[in-house]
Amino acid sequence: MTESSPETWSVRVTKDTLVFSAAHFITFNGNVCERIHGHNWRVEAEIEGPLDENHYVFDFIALRDGLQTLVQELDHRVLLPDRHPMIQVKVSEDAREVTTTFEDRRWVFPQEDCVILPIENTTAELISRWIGQTLILRLKLNEQHGLTRLRVSVEENFGQWANCWLPLAKAEIGKRKAEK
Ligand SMILES: [Zn+2]
């Protein structure tokens, strides 16, 4: 349980319910833009760190529920990127519609059908990072007993996973000290 202990630990949550069906389109190779299409995305998460006083790395149920809530927020939605250099996403003044444009193409959706994500492109990689960053905030993973790392994985198509590893408090504290 101490830092010099030879063991390392993690907890990982993967469930049949940790899936969401959502539409998206991405750009690649500069200005190639996909047609809108959907996936049944699957999500899993793993937290690394020392054991706490309960001999836990982190409570499985809290991790499962945090991820489940996030997944439900994305389910049956159109995922749109807010930081794409070429895809413009605008919410109408009455907040009822979202108009998205790319070059001469235009899509209009009911606002409640969309999730506008603060990312550059709705790739599985960037969705996994956003899910990870949101989990860190909601579950206060930086305020726990020295948890070191979170991994979030997103499967876009069967057997095609993107992984994002995010450092937790220990690494962040080290970074802040170095910046001083
Ligand atoms: Zn896709």
Image (tube, grey):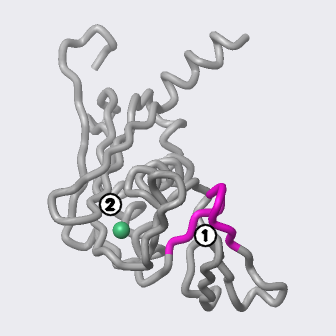
Q: Residue at x 45, y 52 (%)?
A: 29
Where is residue 24 shown, x and y percent of the image?
Answer: 45, 73
Answer with left or right where residue 12 lies relative to residue 167. left
Q: Amino acid at mark 1?
A: Ile
Q: Which residue is mark 2?
A: 64
Which residue is disc 1 drawn over? 116
Image spot of residue 47 (x, y percent): 33, 40
Up/down of 58 relative to 28, above or below? above
Q: In the rendered structure, which segment of residues is drawn in magenta?
A: 79-89
Quote the CA–CA distance across marks 2 and 1: 23 Å
Q: Tell me which image quadrant ligand 1 sits in.
A: bottom left
Is the residue indicated by label 1 positioned so its CB lies within 8 Å of ligand 1?
no
Q: Quadrant of the C terminus?
A: top right
Q: Quadrant of the N terminus?
A: top left
Question: Residue at position x 39%, y 33% from top?
Answer: 149
Q: Amino acid at mark 2?
A: Arg
Does mark 2's beta carbon lie closer than 8 Å to ligand 1?
A: no
Write the residue at 47% across / 81% down. Answer: 77
